[in-house]
Image (cartoon, rainbow, N blue to C red):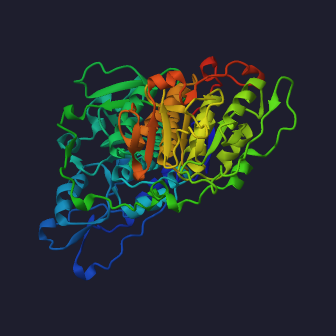
Amino acid sequence: SISFLLLCSINYSINYIGLSQVSKQLVNHVLNQNNETLIQTFTNKTSGDDDSEHNDEATLTTIVENRSSISLKESHEDCILIKNKVLPSNITHSNDRLIPRVIHLFIPKRCLPPSIVESIIQPWLDVPQHSILFHDFEEISHKLSTHRYDFVRRACYIEQDALVDLARFVYLYDEGGLSFDIDYIPGPGFRNGTIFDAGSSARKGYDNKPIHVVVESDSDGRFVAAEPNNFLIMSSLLLTVGKLYSQFSSLTYHKFRAEVYPSYINNLYFAGKPKSARQVIIIRRPVKNMRLFTTHLHIMLNSSRLPGGEMLRLVSPLPQQLRFSLNQSCAQFLYEKQARNPPSMEALMNLTDHDQIMSCPPGLVPISNQILPNRSYSDSNKLIPPMLHMTAKSKCLTPAYRDNINAWKDTQHSFFLHDDAAVQRLFDEEEWLEFPLLREVLPCVNSGAMKADIWRYLFTWKYGGIYTDMDNSPGLKSLWEGNNSIKPEDDAFFEVERDGFPSQYFFAVSPHHPISYFMLSRAIYGLLCCLKSVQRTALAVSLTGPGACKTGIMNAIGGSGYYNAAVYSGVGNRSVTIVGNKRTARRGVYAWRSNVTGDLELMNMSHYQNVKNPARIKLPNH
């Protein structure tokens, strides 16, 4: 067991089979193989044979060395059983490189038609000096479900690209090597010698150090190579999990795939620009202030200009037999509203009524909740619960904020104030399987504004209701009895704010509305991909605030993020009502924004725009 710090001082306990142990097992197993063939053919008579048992600790389950006896032309079988090709460790794990000569390929099943084996599988088996490991769906599923990282175990994947990316980064992080999309076959530039032997500049990186990571420029992930336990691969795995929400959005995961690959690695952690597009290898050094990556190098590969020819050739269209058939059931949390237990007033009271404030410091007054008849979950005929929610550091506020809260209470809605203790109780309330990285990113939140952003998305996801910033005042068409802009049939409600996109400072949703899911998922992803920025300054607006809200709405209903007043239909046939325009926002028709000012220091609070030096995240050495 080894321990390492991941992201924001998050500890993981890792059980890892050392490379030397794996190499020893490989050598012993290869020596014990008696000239076994790489590919075993199946006939109808032997179709009951079972080759599904795999080593859970390593993917090198079927170790073979000799392929001379293969004869595809002479076979008349329905399918061919694909086995791994594993070479001795002195070839695949030589001392002159950090990246092993091991190729990882992902296939739905090991039994494939002869035509596919001949056109796609066989070219990879012909690559010299490389072990070839095929990972089928059964093995991948087991690997991900029992993996040592909880956030991978909790991940929901319903698209092939999402599954392949999860598997790619898990295997590369654990074992190192090269990974290719199965719809590519090796070109002459790969078969004529490895990509690392294209020249001395390819074998050595910045300051004449060995290569750690190789990715292809302007690629959506068809090729990645890395040494074992490289932090950039772990970062890519985190981003993949963080981006899985796009599978359920108005778009697809595939359209976002490039964000996880070189564009992210190039721009976030490494300085410098390519000198010439004609270069085969471009060396990128880590930025000076990113201590996590001072020992990691990034090499961009222009694969079309390899000395021996192009590196990869596309197989199009991809045969149906190489497409994964994935179970969609893990996505029901978003689409099947009835599968959810409805929120309860008892649970809501437990969140907000603990540690009641009996007295407050001088200059502050206590704030109490307000629970009205017919203004709860069971007593209302509205989709959006007629309950108003605010968050503040404590339940002791100045008289000005008390008077503002009383104005909201006068709209005849139940009211709940969530202090820091209530916010934390919500985070700890359950495991939140829908958001597999929530617990991982919370330590990266370095300002109260960011925490309030994440809280409002999570709270409205489970409990629904009406949210408003504490410095907003009710407008003329806000929530007043007889003039309530939120109608009983509204499933989600946003006003257009002054900049033209839906407001994050005042909105309302029903419980488990996809829009809350997408807003929170986008905020989590923003924290992951902007770790460099988060440790420097509080970018609440773009990472977790209005930017995440706007993008979440785009994922739910499509569009550009700028909408006219209308009712929109989105994911899961859930509707979103958008009202107003820039002018009504400036006039405060629905909510007077920032109508209460000052006194924040007395409440030990500060406005996010006034945060000059936010708490820095202490990043660990890797």
Q: Vertically, is 403 above or below 69?
A: above
Q: Nearer the viewer, residue 313 or 369?
A: 369
Q: Quadrant of residue 478?
A: top right
Q: Residue at x 86, y 27 (%)?
A: 361
Q: Residue furthest left?
A: 73
Horizontal placement of 308 versus 139: left or right?
left
Q: Nearer the viewer, residue 561 or 30?
A: 561
Q: Quadrant of residue 195?
A: top left
Q: Residue at x 71, y 25 (%)?
A: 605
Please state the horizontal and vertical placement of residue 586, each as a whole percent of the image: 51, 21
Q: Vertically, is 506 above or below 568?
A: above
Q: Residue at x 34, y 20 (%)?
A: 273
Q: Vertically, is 180 above or below 260?
A: below
Please state the horizontal and vertical placement of residue 17, each as a whole percent of the image: 52, 54
Please state the horizontal and vertical placement of residue 523, each as a whole percent of the image: 51, 37
Q: Residue at x 85, y 31 (%)?
A: 360
Q: Is residue 210 visible?
A: no
Horizontal placement of 271 versus 605: left or right?
left
The quarter in which the C terminus is drawn is: top right
Q: Nearer the viewer, residue 463 or 576?
A: 576
Please state the horizontal and vertical placement of residue 183, each as a whole percent of the image: 24, 50
| Number of dots carrying numbers | 0
Q: Residue furthest bottom?
A: 45
Q: Is residue 465 visible?
A: yes
Horizontal placement of 148 versus 428: left or right?
left
Q: Vertically, is 43 above or below 224?
A: below
Q: Nearer the viewer, residue 365 or 180?
A: 365
Q: Quadrant of residue 178?
A: top left
